[in-house]
Image: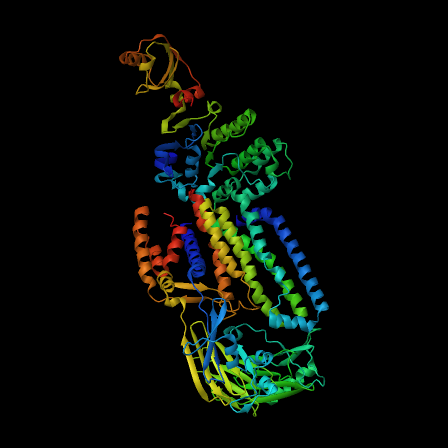
Amino acid sequence: MYKALAYKEWIKIRWWAVGSLILELLLLIYIFTNLRAVIEYNSAEMIWSSIVYKSYMFFQSLKYVPFVVGIFISVAQYLPEVLDMKLKLTLHLPLEENRVLLFLNLFGTTTLLLLFIPLVAVLVIGSSIVFPSEITYAMIISIIPWFLSGFLSYFFVSAIMIEPTWSRRLVIAIIGYFLINEFLVDVILGGFIKIIVVLIVFTLLYNYAHMLSGLRFKRGSK
Amino acid sequence: MIFSAKLSRYLLVITAIIVVSIILPSFYSMLFYNSYPVPRVYFSPVSKDFLFNKAGGKDLLRYDREGKMYTREEFERLTPFFNYRQLLYREEMPDSLNGVALDIQDVKLNNVFYAIKPYDIFRYTIMLNPLIESAPGRPDLQMPHEFFRIAEKMEFINCSTNEVEAELSNLFNNALIENGFAFPAKNVFGNPSTRKPFDEGYLVVDNSDKLFHIKRIKNKPFIRKVEIPEGIKIDYIHLRESNLKEQYALFITDDNKIFIISYDNYRIIEIPSEGYDRKEMQLVIKGNMFYREIGFVSNKIVKTIVTDRNYKVIDTYEETLKTNEDYLVGDVSNYLFPFKLSLTSSDNLYVDFYSEISDLRFLIVSSLLAVFYLVFSRKRDNKFQLIDTIIILVTGIYGLIAVVLIKHES
Amino acid sequence: MEYVVEVKNLTHYYGSKKVHENLNFNIKKGSIFGLLGKNGTGKTTTINILNGFLKPKSGQCLILGEDSYKLSPKTKSQIGFLIEGHIQYSFMNIIQIEKYYSQFYPQWKRDVYFDLMSKLKVLDNQKISKMSCGQRSQVTLGLLLAQDPDLLILDDYSMGLDAGYRRLFLDFLKEYGKAENKTIFITSHIIQDLDGFLDDCVILDYNGVVLQMPIDEFKNTFKMYQFNTNQTELISKDGVINNFEIIKNKATVYSFNDVENVQNHLRTKGVNFTDFKDHKMDLEDAFIGLTGKY
């Protein structure tokens, strides 16, 4: 039965997922052609210096992409559900409602993972070709919070969509905005290393962020 | 569904508390806090006493310990080493001071001025550095084409090919092994710039907290184990090449002691460090032909120890500064906010949970809020919301905002 | 189990606006039950509560013996639910949606669905969002019939449908209800279609339930009387007269009482009448007679 549910989710998001992949591809092309140009224009050792001492982030343009992809997937998945209250159909299925809601978010989380992993993989491989592992490692530490912001934007937008009242939607949006802001704070390369594990665990918890709104939807809160 | 929703609600409530405890105090301080200027401390070789300047209105206020005010010109005349360029310009530079002839070249050479900020120490560093050729055989230093790492072994990586230069790496690696270096390096400190008079390479703390000086001379390794006092752990080294050639570097230990590595056969000299805390104070080192000034500066305290050039203490100045904590706005903030959260810090370049935890004064306000909420929730839901009340008791105004914004579902 | 749906003392408010107060009704197994009322009398609210999409302020609502707010998956599989406006996953086409729903219901009747679809002039890859309202109603009907539920809950099946599709919809339902001894709960604001279809009904007014009885009893006992009178001002709603209309000195009164009782009642009120006639009514007339035209 969950397979069927996944089938429906897939139908909703597939073009958005493809769109996100294209966006990521364009981003990667931009990042690496730009890096190549910068190295050729200056010199390799200068770029290394800039990275090590001035936290030059050649992957900077990636920063908001996961955030945007997270919103894409959430909208693709939940907008069709909340237009005309179609979520009622989904909740009426012979399954437990909270499992259905959790499954929907896990589907989205998995989709984001599948969208993000190739992006990270190409970045890591690309970086490893040009830079030593120390720089690649620092890059990974720096981009993880950005990717987490993608999951968070997904979780919060999902909660906003399912939520039946406008006042609560606003509250969730404000909380989400300021929380995500902290993940996107500008710091030096590798600056997130001390709390990266906490942030990952913390982010995973937000798979539950929409459940309260789910209950409110079911109860018909006004 | 009820259970998940409860979990979900507490997750959102906690998130709201976190977010509000970040935003609200910073908003509060933006609105109500004043900034109190931190005085800069000077030791006048003329009056042999401390002088100060600090921001006040449009201009700097210049004054001494007695509170006597000075004009800019008077002040500059009292600090001839620090302001020698200005005095030269006005042709007021004395020829001699305290019976010592002042040669401008000497003044320049002996002037020292640098600061180590907490965030210089507490930051993530990528342990890759260029090892500059110390004897380039040319007037200028040149950036090498490789960066080195000292992990399981010392390796040089060519920047263009990103490949290890095996020959050079082995040369240095073997030299390190011969000198008893314990891999991997814990920390590498240097001054990776070509805009300096000469190059002194790097000071490297090995895995057993021993100190090594590594240089590249005519593409050959120069390795020198530096004997440091037993039991100390070096946290930070400030290495700077200076023509004075008095000291290679200054280092700070993890118990806030400060040492100098002198050119005198790497002799280690401990310098006064009482009252210094590297986590929140700037270490300001000044020096001239006659004195050394060791300053510790935060927004709460300013301390300067003046010594002679052998670090024998001559005079000490310490001033506790007024902060917002000393005024009503600070008091109110202590009653209002149980803690203040931030993920970034001005003293530290790591992202972390920096929380300023208030004393227990907040409990007065949070108890009131909790009682108020308890009565209110009893009226609304005909039920005591005990957990929410406890949340408010512990997190005060943040908790109240959170549980009101994300109401309990009956 | 005699009753499929039991509604006990159901009370619900939107804020301070009362929707239901102490609503009570039961639906017998195998019956076709209508919840009738004008727009805004709480039909959809009732449906939402029955399906667990609204938590009532107080009272209880049992479906197949379970609290409607906490229906188990097994019970949900026995309930077919039509959302007002024939809402379905409009981003799917008829093949995809069948593939989807068939996974959830073990007794899925694929042929029923595709028989119905073959009569529709839609392409296999045509999204439901690109279909007409009538076509969409056939898709939702097909899905409901293929699900083969014991209880069908239909929220305003007539919405947006022209007469042909409405008739088609009911014809299928009638067959379904008859052949399988299934229970159907239906709301509509087009009453005339339901004449001869319903077994039982509840009629809602803005103030709550005005009537609850088998449909035949309603049609047989609820009467319209017309007469001429000069004392129109003396006619009022009371225990005998459920509703009345006055045009000049021609009065129309609606009552569950027979001719004799009504005439006696009028006389005791001091209303003199002439030309007293009683009229037959169909369901719609009776509905309007009971609830008024406004």
Instruction: Give the answer, above or below, for where A141 lies relative to B50.
Output: above
Q: Is residue B78 left or right of residue B157?
A: left
State the image coordinates of residue A40 (x, y, percent, origin top left): 73, 68
C85 to the left or right of A119: left
Quarter of the rendering containing residue C74: top left
In the image, residue B268 sits, relative to residue A62, either above or below, namely: below
Residue reaching furthest to the left: C268
Colour option used: rainbow
The quadrant the C terminus of chain A occupies is: top left
- Residue C75 coordinates in the image, percent (x, y): 44, 42
Q: Residue at x 43, y 83 (%)?
A: B316
Residue C76 or C52: which is nearer the viewer? C52
| Residue B182 shows in the view | no
Q: Quick one: which residue is furthest to the front in this view?
A: B91
Which residue occupies the foreground of this view, B141 or C258? B141
C231 left or right of B258?
left
Classify residue B375 as left or right of residue B230: left
Mark count: 0
Q: Residue C164 location in percent, x, y?
A: 56, 25
| Residue at horizontal 61 percent and vertical 40 percent from the top | C95
Report the front residue among C152 and C282.
C282
Q: Is residue C97 visible?
A: yes
- Say which residue appears at 49% left-offset and 48% top-offset: A160
